[in-house]
Amino acid sequence: MEKTKRSNFTGSIGFVLAAAGSAVGLGNIWRFPYLAAKDHGGIFILCYIILALTFGFALLTTEIAIGRKTAQSPLTAYKKIHKKWGGIGTLACLVPVLILPYYCSIGGWVIKYFVNFTTGQAGVSAEDGYFTQFISQTWQPIVYMLIFLALTSLIIFRGVNKGIENVSKILMPILLILVIGISVYSLTISHTDADGVTRTGLQGLKIYLIPDFKGITLKELLMIIMDAMGQLFFSISVSMGIMIAYGSYVKKDTNLMKSINQIEIFDTIVALLAGLMIVPAVFVFMGQDGMSAGPGLMFISLPKIFDQMGKIGVLIGVLFFLMVIFAALTSAVSVMEAIVSSIMDKFGLSRKKSALIVFAYAAIAGIIVCFGYNLLYFELPLPNGTVGQVLDVLDYISNSVLMPLVAFLTCILIGWVVKPKTIIDEVTLGGIKFSRKHLYILMIKFVAPIMLFILLLQSVGITF
């Protein structure tokens, strides 16, 4: 078995932008706004920020440090930390294996909407039932899924520096400019409905940002905290092997603490801006009721809003879906890289062979996901109270079961088996100061495992 030299990010900025690119994906732009709208806006955001600075920080630090310490991908890294705990690596690697096919399917939907808006079909996208009609077609969703997968694979094929790092350096700044631009515009709009009621973007901003605890029960608050915690997995890309893979490409002289702080800040700002871009606009055109649109917000509610804006709405729609393609692409690249790097480390295959294997798998599994809305359609009641098709089942297993389980086991391994010193020593290499060391120990040993255990129970239908 030939051992190839491990690639590295050329510097900390390349690593931060690649990791932030992974973190800023559909989870931030699609999931964050509808959860914020559902969970009393400001209360959800307050919970999210507190959790990001404590719980999220502890998990992010752990995974990046494990990656750099072992110089291994998720599949093999845990075994290097402790021989008997290698199984966590298998579970961690299983998460991106399940996510990649359906992530590419959703990425394909985004490309379809971008094509519609750029070819004068914006009005069609806003029609009732359009989204369901599109995903129920047999072949069109498959074509778009394969286009998205091909773009992702091309970046992976080019490697860590020429592919992941270079693309992140180009796409992330553009993404940030687009998000800020659309957010600012969202605050300037107003609309008078059929009843003569005028709503403004600034009123929507107030609902989005200011916490209103009136009438909130303790049970509701716990539910919001759990929603914010579940969102964090998406937002910072933990418990899916990605940050371990990226950490393994970080040079030993990189200041990990500084990089982790930058990733946290970048991710939180983009998540908040995504909500700022979407929630006020939904409030302006659909009122308080439109804010509970749920997961359909991006593909059903927003095209209607862009349509109501007139000609400027088409331009905003083009820019919005272009931005979502960029965000989805940087995340899909990181999901695919977690699998590719695992195959390379485990079996000693070259990057190109590993990438081809993953491409073939994702194409076949992605076709099955697309068929889940037509030829393979079924309705399966899930333990968390929802009813799912193929995509929903994969999403439930990966996000609601495996990710909290991987994070919980990682906390036990680091907090109690090999001790937090293992991570602290890696972070403080070269005399770097670990400013939140005591918070880290408290989170990894006590707070995070308890919260994760509650989240796991909730995911399998056990509520308090």
Image: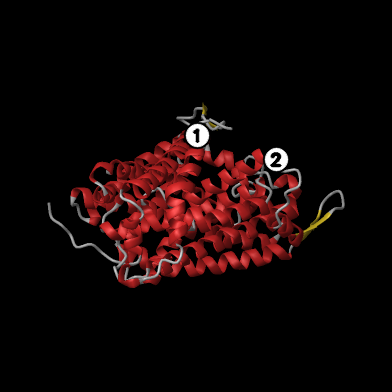
Give how far apart the Cα atoms at labels 1 and 2 are.
20 Å
Instruction: Farthest residue to the left: give it.
Output: 1
Residue at image point 44% right, 55% down: 58
Identify the residue at horizontal 29%, vertical 53% (top origin).
Answer: 73
Q: Residues within 10 Å of mark 2 (few under 14, many from 20)?
A: few
Q: Which residue is mark 2?
A: 217
Q: Position of residue 427 (x, y in %)?
A: 35, 64
Judge whether 134 appears above or below 7 on screen: above
Disc 1 secondary structure class: helix
The circle on residue 290 is none
Q: Is residue 435 above or below residue 398?
A: below
| Left or right of 89 on screen, residue 172 | right
- Which residue in the protein does label 1 denote? 457
Q: Foreground: 219 or 336?
A: 219
How many numbered discs sit on the rendered protein?
2
Amino acid beneath label 1: Leu
Dividing the picture into quadrants, the one containing residue 177 is bottom right
Precedes in sequence: disc 1 or disc 2: 2
Placement of 288 over or under 254, stated as above or below: above
Where disc 2 sits, the SS reads loop
Type of amino acid at the residue the image marks with label 2: Thr
Q: Position of residue 306 (x, y in %)?
A: 67, 56
Q: Quadrant of residue 85?
A: top left
Residue with the most extreme right position:
196
Image quarter hosting the C terminus: top right
Q: Position of residue 397 (x, y in %)?
A: 44, 36
Which of the two residues, 342 or 180, is positioned nearer the viewer here? 342
Contact? badges 1 and 2 (CB < 8 Å)? no
* Residue at the (62%, 48%) spot, across then down: 34
